[in-house]
Amino acid sequence: MLVLSGLSIAQEDTLRLFQASPQRNLKRLQVVVGGELLAGGGSLVVLGTAWYKDYPRTTFHAFDDNREWLQMDKAGHAVTAYTLGRYGIGLMQWAGATRKRNVIYGGLLGFAYLGVVEIFDGFSSGWGFSSGDLIANAFGTGCVLGQQLAWNEQRITLKYNFRKTRYAQYRPSLLGSSVAEQWLKDYNGQTYWLSFNLASFFSEQTKIPAWLNVAIGYGANGMTGGHENPVYSSANGTQLSFARYRQYYLSVDVDLTKLPIESPFWKAFVGTFGFLKIPAPALVLEQGRLRASVLE
């Protein structure tokens, strides 16, 4: 049924295919639900066999990791839950679902998926169920649901960006041995943002470009361990130590979903990457001092 529905949709006019359906479209809804179940279920199977394979299963237990990584992992949970929820709403809109179903079944996608992952953690000896993770997931989901209910759009986007750092070389097994792994594991190179779309909060008379955003970011640096850094020595025996500190950012940004793109295909394609913060000059507050950064 899912395959037949997909083939039928593929035969739609290209212009209409990448636009939201004005009314409930059963074929599209079947593709959305089936695709989410396949993608979500498949990723959980991979996660269960790869991520947890070196850690024996135990009875369900909790683990307090709220003080780790200067809470960067919690920011990551919030942004992930928000992003999946926003994708979920977009897919339900594409299928022509009612506004109520968009919010309930689409916006809760991230919370539901990450909730299953949290249960997996609870049965793993290497991790445990984290109430802090659950709260962060709820925060990200609340951001997407609240805005959809209040404004029927996302005026404040939770975003992410990454830059390569020097810390992964000291603990590649923990922070990542490749750039692809470091995207997920090296919290020193990650920054999480609240990106505000200015035009959404002002009248049209202000002439603010629809795509222009101002973003507030949070990051951390100097971390080679969750709670504290192990002691390292250089080749000549000199001890290496890194100061752990938080970073706060103010920068400009672009809302990719509001760029003046006429093609429905390219508009949908570019909007898919709306969770990424566009590199731009920024002001950075760290260790009690303010500095300018060329690219953040």
Image (cartoon, rainbow, N blue to C red):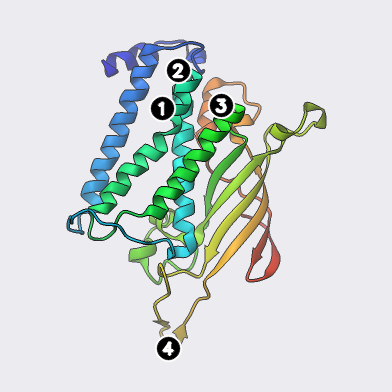
Across and down, in percent, residue 52 comes to: 23, 53
Residue 226: which quarter of the image?
Answer: bottom left
| Residue to which mark 2 is pinned | 97
Q: Which of marks 3 and 1 is nearer the N terminus?
A: 1
Amino acid at pointer 4: Asn
In this rendering, is residue 25 above or below 108? above
Tell whether 193 sits left or right of 117. right
Q: Distance between the residues labelled 1 and 2?
A: 10 Å
Q: Which of marks 2 and 3 is nearer the N terminus?
A: 2
Please give the count of numbered marks on the rendered protein: 4
Q: Which of marks 4 and 1 is nearer the N terminus?
A: 1
The one nearer the camera, 123 or 11, is 123
Q: Earlier in the sequence, mark 4 or mark 2?
A: 2
Q: Is mark 1 on a helix, strand or loop?
A: helix
Q: What element carries label 4?
A: loop
Residue at the image position 43 percent from the left and 45 percent from the top: 137
Q: Distance between the residues labelled 4 and 1?
A: 58 Å
Amino acid at pointer 1: Tyr
Q: Mark 1 and mark 2 in contact? Answer it, CB < 8 Å.
A: yes
Nearer the camera: disc 2 or disc 3: 2
- Give the numbered dot on residue 105: 1
Nearer the camera: disc 4 or disc 2: 2
| Residue to which mark 4 is pinned | 236
Residue at the image position 21 percent from the left and 48 percent from the top: 49
View extreme (bottom): residue = 237
Q: How far apart are marks 2 and 3 (CA)?
A: 21 Å
Residue at the image position 28 percent from the left and 30 percent from the top: 38
Amino acid at pointer 3: Lys
In this rendering, is residue 197 above or below 119? above
